Image (cartoon, rainbow, N blue to C red):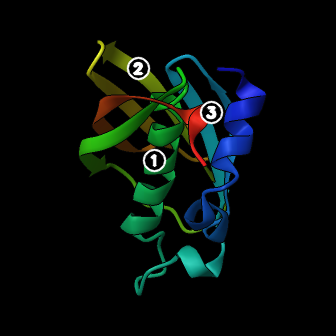
Amino acid sequence: MQSEELSRFFKRDRFAEYNGIELLEVGDGRARSAMKLTPNHLNGLGIVHGAAIFALADFTFAAASNSRGNVAVAINANISYMKSVSTGTLYAEAREVSINHKLGTYTIDVTNEAGELLAVFQGMVYRKKEKIDQLP
């Protein structure tokens, strides 16, 4: 599937839009996204809420896993947090670890502007026969 088509498809993700997540690039089995932090992303300690980091990683996971044109839905996801931040822009980069006709596994690294690793997300998808470009 062409990256322009995928970018248009993922612009329909209202939750990502609400959280300020932007898809920077997408291709076969990979994706990269960014999220500029605002005070709305912070928890009571004044650091980025884990759910905000998870949302960025999950969106990037969705983009990478659907990048080959078939609908892919998450069946498992986990995240490990390494470092906290309060300001700046976060980046998530997804890479395909393995894929077959039914399952795909992905690792997503979340970093800050300095390239420091903040979190590692791992996910698995079930790959459906439906094509993304045939969805309503």
Label 2 vs label 1: CA separation? Answer: 13 Å
| 30 or 72, nearer to the observer | 72
At label 3, the amino acid type is Asp
- Residue that extends furthest to the right in the rendered view of this protein: 4
Q: Is residue 23 above or below residue 27?
A: below
Element on which disc 3 rests: helix
For marks 3 and 2, the one nearer the N-term is 2
- Residue 7 found in image quarter: top right
Q: Position of residue 105 (x, y in %)?
A: 30, 25
Element on which disc 2 rests: strand
| Residue at (59% x, 60% y) in the render | 16
The disc at residue 96 is 2
Q: Position of residue 81 (x, y in %)?
A: 31, 52
* Residue 106 visible (yes or no): yes
Residue annotated with mark 1: 57
Tell me, yes or no, whether the two marked residues, 1 and 3, touch with CB atoms within 8 Å: no
| Residue at (41% x, 82% y) in the render | 45
| Residue at (47% x, 73% y) in the render | 47
- Residue that extends furthest to the bottom in the rendered view of this protein: 44
Residue annotated with mark 3: 133
Disc 1 vs disc 3: which is toward the camera?
3
At label 1, the amino acid type is Ala
Image-based side of 123 in relation to 131, left or right:
left
Q: Is residue 63 above or below residue 102?
A: below
Tell me, yes or no, whether the two marked residues, 3 and 2, touch with CB atoms within 8 Å: no
- Residue 20 found in image quarter: bottom right
Q: Position of residue 71 (x, y in %)?
A: 44, 34
